[in-house]
Amino acid sequence: MMGMLAAASADMDLYVAQNIFFGVVAALMIYAAFRVVTTGNVVHAALWLVVVLSGVAVQFIFLGAEFVAITQVLVYIGAVVVLFLFGVMLTRASMGDDESVGTEKRTMAAIVGVLLLAVMSIALIDSFEDTRLVIDEPQSTTLVSDSIFSQYIVPFEAVSVLLLAALIGAIVVARRD
């Protein structure tokens, strides 16, 4: 009986620790996301985006989706952010604070952001109000890869062509000078 109580207590301690760590990571992600949209320096915004995307990978690890977490790191942090920084540096965008953004633009951006949040929240609550996710068995990497490379191969390849076109476009724009 004492052994069962000790095991239950250890499980509860692990559960509490996971929730605390989840909260810390979520708070860091919210702060970093706020800094992405409020910083005036494009390079700093990209680096804050790396923090947000890293937090997403950590959240996937909490969910037990290690494959998706590694994919998040490789694709988004390793490719998209690097491509973004590469494009910014090739196009010689303003690296410092941008004084051309006035108060009226920030006010309009805030209004649009709040409206978008409201519309998305209403749509999500209306669509998934009574839905419960039931997982009978964990998904394997084989099932995920078969889904990506059979049913979703065309969108997967379209995204890779789009990224290649963006890279070529950044090079062309930089070479015109």
Image (cartoon, rainbow, N blue to C red):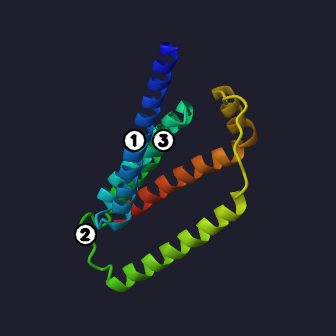
Helix or strand or loop: what does disc 3 sit on? helix
Disc 1 packing (10 Å; few <14; some 14–19; many ≥20): few
Counting residues from the start of the chain, the first of labels 1 and 2 encountered is 1
Type of the residue with mark 1: Ile
Query: Is 110 rendered above or below residue 139?
Result: below
Corner quadrant of residue 133: top right
Q: Are marks 1 and 2 in contact (CB under 8 Å)?
A: no
Task: Residue under label 3, please give it.
Answer: 59
Q: Tell me which residue sits at (40%, 56%) in the image.
A: 30
The spot of residue 105 in percent (x, y) is: 39, 82
Distance CA(mark 2)–CA(mark 3): 32 Å
Q: Specify few, some or many for label 3: CA neighbours under 10 Å numbering under 14, 14-19, or 20 or more.
A: some
Name the residue furthest left.
Answer: 96
Return the mark for residue 97: 2
Picture residue at 68% right of the left edge, 38% below the top: 148
Q: Quadrant of the C terminus?
A: bottom left
Marks 3 and 2: in contact by CB < 8 Å? no
Residue 139 coordinates in the image, percent (x, y): 67, 30
Q: Which residue is mark 1?
A: 20
Residues at discs 3 and 1 in contact (Cβ within 8 Å): no
Q: Amino acid at mark 2?
A: Asp
- Whole-angstrom CA distance, mark 3 to mark 1, is 12 Å
In the image, residue 4 sits, relative to residue 75, either above or below, namely above
Left or right of 47 on screen, residue 1? right
Q: Counting residues from the N terminus, which is met first, the one under dot 3 or under dot 1? A: 1
